[in-house]
Amino acid sequence: MTWIPEAASNLASKVDGLLLVITFISIFFFVLISAVLIYFAVKYRRRSDDEETPYITGNQTLEIIWTVIPSILLILLFVYGFVVYKDMRTPPKDAVDITVTGKQWLWTFEYYNGKKTLNELYVRQNRPVRMVMRADDVIHSFFVPAFRVKQDLMPGRYTQLWFTPTKIGTFDIFCAEYCGTGHSKMLGKVIVLSPEAYDIWEKGVAVDGGEAVASLPPAELGEKLYKGKSCNACHSVDGSVVIGPSFKGLYEREGELEDGASYTADENYIMQSILEPQEQIVKGFQPVMPSFKGILSDAEITAIIAYIKTLK
Amino acid sequence: MANHAVAANVYVSFLEKKGILSWLYTTDHKRIGILYLVSISFFFLIAGMIAMLMRFELLTPASDFVSPHTYNVLFTLHGSIMVFFFVVPGLAASFGNFLIPLMIGAPDVAFPKLNIGSYWLYLLGTLILLFALLQPADTGWTFYTPYSANTDTDVILLTFGVFVLGFSSILTGLNFIVTIHKMRAPGMTWHRLPLFIWASYATAVLQLLATPVVGITLLLLIAERTLGIGFFDPAKGGDPVLFQNFFWFYSHPAVYIMIIPAMGVISEIIPVFSRKPIFGYKAIAYSSLGIAFISFLVWAHHMFTSGISEVAATIFSFLTFLVAIPTAIKVFNWTATLYKGSIELHSAMLYALGFIFLFTIGGLTGVFLGALAADIHLHDTYFIVAHMHYVMIGGTVMGFFGAIHFWYPKWFGKMFNEAVAKLAWFLVFVGFNVTFFPQFFLGVQGMPRRYATYPEEFQSLMALSTYGSWILGLGVLIMTVNLIKGLFSGEKAPQNPYGSLSLEWQVPSPPPLENFVEIPHVTDWPYGYGKKKEVDA
């Protein structure tokens, strides 16, 4: 593990330069102060109780030096921080807009051509993107450590950030502003594709290990989706209640709904709950689940059901 | 009475009277100081134990000890109790009360009844806030809207609790300002004041001016809830960023309410155990006021990623760098005081040196966070958690522990076991660094704060941090037992065990009820240690 994630955007190396400069200056002052402190504490330790000490109350030259030098350094660091920040806040004219919505506890990305993805952001290598972001409920914060970018999402107003991904690969998205029980599960991935792979993805063909996913047994694909599509933010698989009912032993479970009707968790019930979650709220739970209509395909829903069946 | 008593070398100590009512209705600043000391220490230990539970949960990436919701409740409790019940009243209310009259040569504070009234308000505020927190709240100690408004948490009651606690601060601050202005003994000029008094004065000004903002926030919240006027709630047309502005307009100066008194403590301990005059008295005194002033103008550096305008972010970043200057000056002055001294590594001195060491790390890592582009990456990660704890534990708590070990003989008239105290210091110092230093690296790598579960790649550093919390916890436990044991079985303390020149050491230990038999006439500053080469004015 390196001390900082791999720099994978145009901004990352600039931020790293700043971090490095501050680190060097900090280490210099820290070592200086601690060395003097320890040296004095050892050299001037009390050897007898009637030692004589000099009456020194200050030294104007010294005090001016150690006020002026740190002040100059601090102002230079301020300017350095500002210059990089200005870059971070000024998206280039040719940046492609992607709309981001943060909602407890998932990310939705909408692309200019109408495509929509959940928790997975697809971008093309070396093409600048501008994220136009808004929260649906409470404040969230979009954070990609490998890109060194972070911006809060607010309900009721748009915020923005931009970056140019420079490395092909998959990088973490974290929600950095506390947003409730599922906060630490509000995770996503940025998938940076080569221009050729991006064009294929744009045309609607699965690229993210497409063949591998297709050949997975349904229950295993279901497990992948359970984690990848944020089901795990609210539904446990060990019987504990997080936000929604646990998936453990869910299949063929019988119980009562909020409106008094009874239900049996068969395939149709589970599919209905994924597509129209507000229709059948289990007694004792809050109607907070978003619909996954248009986000999960029929095959994916089938896979999730297959996965639930394995959780006895 | 006192004249006669002291003449006979038996005097009535302020601890003489027994019974619970003699405490609850006391107007004696020394007793009120003890009431605060006991209360805040109690809450410190409780919140510390909550932190240990959190660290235990974080030993592994999955949530296997408590549920995510319980974890969120725990960090809300830990933060709120530590901030509002412990550090904000903290040193100012406990040691400020005990020391201010003794150090300036006064029989008590200016308004003794208001003083005990402030303590009652503190108790009332803790009850209200605890009641609101135990519903339970899971908003974090910052209560950001709209999350706090959307959950079951009663934000109005929470803010009301903070407001009542704040009122206790305001009245204490007012009391201290008047006391320092009006009650100084003859000859105690401003430039002869101990530096702890300068620090207390700066703190009191902050308490008086910053705390009313909590009241304004409360009124706006009530207006929003009852009249439907949108201030903070976007659903009503309000702006959640406005809440953050209000919150930090109080809470950032509050950070300095927490740290400035600790800086005052360090300025007292170092000259005594170095037998040297404090280096750069005026620079230290005025830098306290400088820090207090600038601290009103930096609040939005908590909000660089909130969507505030780029211009605002730039101005606040610049002002944040300014606050580093007076802080750096203090660190250099303390270090220079050691030069050619006769240094005794008493436990109080060890805490003071530990303070300089840790606070320097806290201050330098603050430079990362003040620099705009660096803050964008580090904000809301474990880097913030580590920085904040280096300032609050490495700074305030080290100062608090140092103050306890330094003034313990004076306050209680007993001595504690010094060898055990040194051992406890060592464990606290090592444990603290093992707990929090790895968190800087976690933050740089991108680990967000307030995560009940976390990706596996962070586990080794997270586990190291948890092991550190065990060492730290053990150190605090040993220290607490040692200090309590000293109260019962400690040797009787002499009047001035360290040979300090400050006024509080010129009265018996524990001090008499009236402090001074005769109000002293002050002729020199309290740092006249060492051999003068020439007469210094």
Image: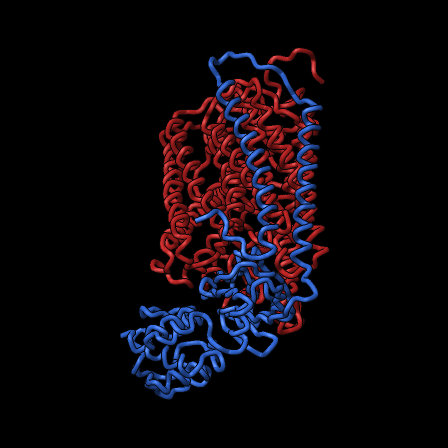
Rendered position, B342 above or below B60:
above
Q: Is residue B211 visible?
A: no
Vertical relation: A95 (above or below) B504: below
Instruction: From this view, report whether residue A156 is shown above or below residue A27.
Output: below
Which image quadrant: the C terminus of chain B?
top right
- Number of on-image labels: 0
List x then y, in percent, for residue B310.
70, 57
Looking at the picture, tell me which residue is in the foreground, B149 or B119.
Answer: B149
Q: What color is chain B drawn in?
A: red
Left or right: residue B79 versus residue B316 is left
Give the residue at x 38% y 87%. Answer: A260
**Residue B283, how many percent across, how many down?**
68, 30
Q: Residue at x 38, y 49 (%)?
A: B460
* Colour in which the image shows chain A: blue
Q: Is residue A54 visible in the rendered structure shown here?
A: yes
Front residue (pair A86, B71): A86
